[in-house]
Amino acid sequence: MRGATRALAAAVVLAAATALSACERETRRFSEQPPAAAPVSAVVMSDLQPGPSTPDLPMRSAYEENAWAVGEGKRLYGAFNCSGCHANGGGGIGPPLMDEAWIYGDAPENIFATIVEGRPNGMPSFRGRLGNQQVWQLVAYVRSLSGKVAKDVAPGRSDHMYVSPQEQETRDTTPVRSSTPPGAVTP
């Protein structure tokens, strides 16, 4: 009897610990300090550099592990009309963001520098228009477009694309032919 009680208590503790650790992806950190942005001169554009070679240290952003932050990046992507050039990540006037080959690299610090500084031939600088936290949210969303964040963090379809079951029922009905405009009909 005592062994069963201990096993049950251990199972409850394990389940509670698992539940608490799984909630991290939805945490909203409004006053969190964003990761330190690498100075623009520290972003490596090529393998050529003076002096001895230094190992590249990958930068990991906490924003890429937070579904809310990636969702905010998606909102900013739409608000700043990034889709005007990059479409919904598939490219257009600007390069695609869903492929593996990126001109300036797909590392978070390179994407940060691209957003803040801009790039020649079309990418405008957003310096002064976005705070560091917002830029890191955009970086996380842009990396999610090419599958570089965890699937449970990546945003799904936009909320405005959701059709409620009630709307679906009215869409499925066949239209009735009438010469009266729809706005002139009173219930």
Image: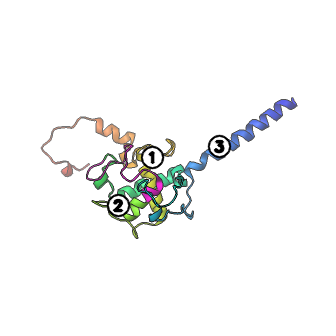
Q: Check disc 3: other Cα within 10 Å, few if <14, some if 14-19, many if 20+.
A: few
Q: Check disc 1: other Cα within 10 Å, few if <14, some if 14-19, many if 20+.
A: some
Spatial CA distance of label 3 from label 1 is 21 Å
Spatial CA distance of label 2 from label 3 is 36 Å
Q: Label 3, on which residue?
A: 19
Residue 179 is situated, as x and y percent measured from the top left of the image, at: 12, 44
Q: Earlier in the sequence, mark 3 or mark 1?
A: 3
Q: Tag on residue 155?
A: 1
Decide if residue 172 is in sight here.
Answer: yes
In what element is the residue under mark 3? helix
Instruction: Verify whether residue 93 appears in magenta.
Output: yes
Identify the residue at image location x=32%, y=63%.
124
Q: Nearer the viewer, residue 147 or 167?
A: 147
Q: Earlier in the sequence, mark 2 or mark 3?
A: 3
Residue 84 is situated, as x and y percent measured from the top left of the image, at: 28, 55
CB contact under 8 Å: marks 2 and 1: no
Question: Is 173 on the left or on the right of 47, as rendered?
Answer: left
Q: Earlier in the sequence, mark 2 or mark 1?
A: 2
Question: Is 27 on the left or on the right of 11, as rendered?
Answer: left
CB contact under 8 Å: marks 3 and 1: no
Decide if residue 138 is in sight here.
Answer: no
In what element is the residue under mark 1? loop
Q: Tell me the kind of residue under disc 3.
A: Ala
Q: Tell me the kind of residue under disc 1.
A: Pro
Q: Label 2, on which residue?
A: 80
Q: Nearer the viewer, mark 3 or mark 1?
A: 1
Residue 117 is situated, as x and y percent measured from the top left of the image, at: 38, 64
Q: Nearer the viewer, mark 2 or mark 3?
A: 2
Q: Tell me the kind of residue under disc 2.
A: Phe
Q: Which residues are magenta?
A: 91-112
Identify the residue at image location x=43%, y=50%.
106
Question: Is 90 on the left or on the right of 185, as rendered?
Answer: right
